[in-house]
Amino acid sequence: MKYVTIDNIGGSELNWTAQANASWITVSPRSGNSIINSNASNNITTVNTSQIEISVDRNGLIPGVFTSSVDITSNGGNASIEVTMIVPEAPELEISEAEINFGNLEIIKRIQVSNSGTGKLVWSVSNSESWITVFPINDSTYSENKEITVSANRVGLMPGSYSGKIEINSNGGNKLITVNMSVDELPKIDISPISLSFDINKTTLSFNIRNSGGGELDWNLSSNDNWILFVPSSGKTSTETDQVNVTVNRIGLSPGNYSGSIKIESIYESRMIDVSMTVEQPPLLSYSPQIFNFGEIESTGLIEIINTGGGILNWQLSANQPWITLTQQNGSVSSNQKNEISVEINRSGLQPGNYSGNIIISSNGGNGTIPVSITVLENPIISLSKHTLDFNTGLTSLSFNISNSGTGVLNWNIESNLDPWISVSSSSGSVTTDETEITIIINRALLSPGQHVSKIDITSNGGTESVDIKVESLAGAILSVDQTSIDFGNTATIGTLKIENTGTGTLYWSSEIIYIAGDSDWLQIQPAAGSTDNSVTLTLAANRNGLSGGQHTADIQIYSNGGVQTIHIYLFTGFKF
């Protein structure tokens, strides 16, 4: 603030007022008077002066030079007082954290430094403890935030709680930050077992890693021996136990004893596990025979697989032909031991000729191939579709098939010593892979009433077979028909045929249509078979649809235990143009 004196240099009373022309200027008092007093006896004149206080308020103003005035008006004249003020820059220090706690694990924290005032903030940092590191230790800023990195170094510190201070000094004020940290007991590597020994039969072992100290143990594994493999190769543990599986790779190593190690490391310490391994002579495949020739008859053989080396020989067998069967397809055999495997040959379904194949042996001690050869001779086998034909009381023909279930050509022959009431459609023939149908026909006219049995013997180059024949002939029945020919002419489609039993007993009959000339499948009989003690009328239906023009003929055969009748059927259709 500043003071201004107002004097009355005239006579009488001076009355005045003061007015500030800027809001940042304050005047006190803002009015007053000055009086001149005279003492004639003493010849002294006293002037009553006035004093005003002019103050400025820089709050809220930006840095710079401000100029204004205070106007004084009075009954003795006016005056103006020029007021000049400088607002300097005013930085103010602000920080994001007043306290930092690293706990027992964290090592880095960050503090934001900012200037909430004006101008340039210049600051520097110091700390009270050697385990506290700050960066940077000094800097400056106008308005942007700056970052201080605070690090805690627990190395070499005993377990416990630690506290320190960080002091930030600046031209905008000072700040004090409290820093707290705890140090746990250091992690400690504990392993079990402390050594691994792989004998000739071992390829995988394991060991355990445990943290017998405090905090978290961060461990890594390494080995300078490339035949030692381990999973996992790193890990972290606080209180749990980590298992490491170790595998040794003997491939490519010469027989002998090997020793190596696995190094377990953390940032605090390292430990070693000794590893020893024995590599014996590798397995070596030997086998016999070197070739199989089964010829025309043999169908079984024996393979010997021998391990003439060391260790375990693991082998697999396969055959490249379906007619070769192996009773065992894989196995293992120790040093100087052998496995025996049976080989079976199946010639069934093979055509006559020479065949060759291979038995392939693969193993961890080498591979091999055994050639296999066989000869398949012709071997026809006769087979019948039926071994019994029962003609009952009315049938006069039945069939069976002759086939070859073997190989080659089957030559067959039906013996000629047949009963006179039996006849065959073919008495000899040959068959390879197809079938031959043989029809047996019974002539009931030559049979006396009663049961009749017989046998048909079939000989072949593939064996002998026989078919039993059974026929029953009833007494007294005589077949008779009312007509032996029926002509449907040019337009008729329906006809009838009457069957009569002119004898005694029951007549058992059946019918068959045999197409002679023209088209086929145009005639139907209803009923087609039956029995009667007297008579029965059959309906004959002729279907002209789709028939070609001209004459069509057929025979109806009526078979029975009372004889056989033939009826000739005629039908004519006009030509289509």
Image (cartoon, grey):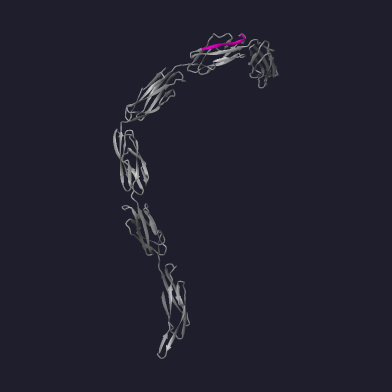
Instruction: Residue 271: give x, y in percent of width and height.
Output: 31, 44
Q: Above or below — where is 92 with respect to 30? A: above
Instruction: Residue 437: give x, y in percent of width and height.
Output: 55, 16
Q: Is residue 452 magenta?
A: yes
Region of the chain picked out in magenta, as a range: 447-458
Residue in the foreground of this view, choosing between 233 and 50: 233
Instruction: Residue 374: give x, y in percent of width and height.
Output: 41, 19
Residue in the foreground of this view, choosing between 261 and 79: 261
Instruction: Residue 259: give x, y in percent of width and height.
Output: 29, 38
Please give left or right for residue 530 compared with residue 153 in the image: right
**Picture quarter containing residue 281?**
top left
Please give left or right for residue 335 compared with residue 420 in the image: left
**Most frequent secondary structure within the magenta stretch:** strand
Residue in the foreground of this view, choosing between 280 and 360: 280
Q: Is residue 181 magenta?
A: no
Q: Above or below — where is 22 with respect to 575? A: below
Instruction: Identify the residue at horizontal 41%, vertical 87% (top origin).
Output: 45
Does any portion of residue 435 appear in the rendered image? yes
Question: Furthest-bottom residue in view?
Answer: 41
Q: Could you tell me how many numbered marks the image carries? A: 0
